[in-house]
Image (cartoon, helix red, strand yellow):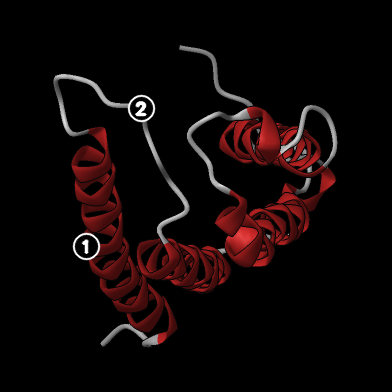
Amino acid sequence: MVTTDHPVHSAPRHAQPLPGQLSRRVGYTLAIVLNVVLLVLVDDVPGWQALPFLTDDFAAVLWLVNASIVAGILANSVYVVHDPPWVRALGDVVTTSVGLAALIRMWQVFPIEFAETWVDMDLVARWVLAVGIAGSVVGIVACAARLVRALTPPD
């Protein structure tokens, strides 16, 4: 075994991101890109009107759908720069809350109409919305608990 009298020096922590940080930043960036593409697809080309099962009533919920997508873009933009656990938990509470508002409005307006099939697809769509609403509520509670844990000093 070789020993040395010289201490081993490594680069300062702030000099470069840790491997986990780098992969998270790549993930955040990818999420931003995908959300921007989704925003363009919904609002511009081809637009939500290209989906035959969406009725004209979708225009009443479009602003909330857009708000949900933009909230995701903004949250991931913050995470790229600074992503401690409390920031991610707060961002997750906000984005999930906006998504929940969009789902609830979709339930109220229900701008979905499927052609007659052997399965009542309107009922299936209602169930999907219900599961999304319930999952969002659970997610908000879990993210709020993460936020409290992240902000609570250790004993």
Visible in this render: residue 7?
Answer: no
Taking 1 as reference, is 26 left or right? right
* Numbered disc 1: secondary structure: helix
Query: For the residue marked with disc 1, what is the amino acid?
Result: Ala
Which residue in the structure is indicated by mark 1? 134
Measured as percent of width and height from the top left, residue 54 is found at 53, 41
Measured as percent of width and height from the top left, residue 7 is found at 68, 39
Measured as percent of width and height from the top left, residue 138 is found at 23, 66
Up the image or down, 155 lies above or below 11; here it is below
Taking depth in this image into account, of 13 and 130 the one nearest to the observer is 130
Q: Give the distance between the C-alpha atoms of the residues marked 1 and 2, in whole angstroms.
A: 27 Å
Up the image or down, 142 lies above or below 145; here it is above
Q: Residue at x 69, y 65 (%)?
A: 63
Up the image or down, 69 lies above or below 19; here it is below
Q: Residue at x 35, y 83 (%)?
A: 148
Q: Residue at x 53, y 14 (%)?
A: 2
Measured as percent of width and height from the top left, residue 57 is found at 57, 58
Label 2, residues with CA under 10 Å away: few <14, some 14-19, many ≥20: few
Which residue in the structure is indicated by mark 2? 115
Visible in this render: residue 69?
Answer: yes
